[in-house]
Image: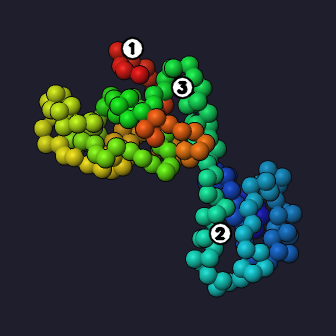
Amino acid sequence: MAAELAELVHRTRAEAIVLSGEEWALDVLASRMSGPLRERVVTVGGDGHRAGAGRALLEQELTEVFRGRMSERDQARVETFRARRTRHAEAVEGMPSVVAALQRAQAGALLLNTPADPPSRLWAGAEPTQIALSSADLESFGVLGFQEESPGAALIRALVRTGTELVVVPRAEMPLEDGVGALLRYTDPGAPS
């Protein structure tokens, strides 16, 4: 079982292995894992969690275990953002700058604070880069057929359709202006920062 688990972790690049069940069985399984694999193990429930103990209870425990925890990849993106923000290069912050980066398909990763506090509305057209802070902005670009949307929906659609990553960052860890920031794929000397 340890070998199968190691293969699964390798294939999926899992950062955590959650185990639940009889304590002695968990100890036996963990003893057969390699050191690096054993370091990823998180146990929940213990002996109280047997078959039929309740999925809802397990999900509640998992929520607590992973609350505020970021993946290694996301943590690396946050550190890159911090470094680039300090140098004022290849990173922008605040809704106007992030929307401008999305309009140019320039954003490689969008950082979003939780809890989120975005503006009340954004405007979006049919194309992924047709996103703006006002309807007048889209009209000035010659966009027809746009609509007012919640910022969450407009941002997520722009992210998905432009291949931008989403990194959720607790506000307490790194507060962002307007709750948003972006790592840029490239810099545009004429773009606002």
For residue 14, what is the image quadrant?
bottom right
Looking at the image, residue 130 sits to the left or right of residue 22; the answer is left
Tell me where residue 71 appears, x and y as whole percent: 62, 48
Front-most of 118 and 110? 118
Q: Which residue is mark 3?
A: 85
Q: Residue at x 86, y 70 (%)?
A: 28
Q: CA distance from mark 1 to mark 2?
A: 48 Å
Residue 86 horizontal/vertical position (percent): 57, 23
Residue wearing tag 1 = 189
| Residue 186, image x, y percentages | 44, 23
Which of marks 2 and 1 precedes in the sequence? 2
Vertical order, 19 against 11 (above or below)? below
Secondary element type, mark 1: loop
Q: Are marks 3 and 1 in contact (CB under 8 Å)?
A: no
Question: Can residue 168 be seen in this snapshot?
Answer: yes
Q: Are marks 2 and 3 in contact (CB under 8 Å)?
A: no
| Residue 68 image position (x, y, % from top left) | 61, 53
> Which kind of residue does numbered mark 3 sit on?
Arg
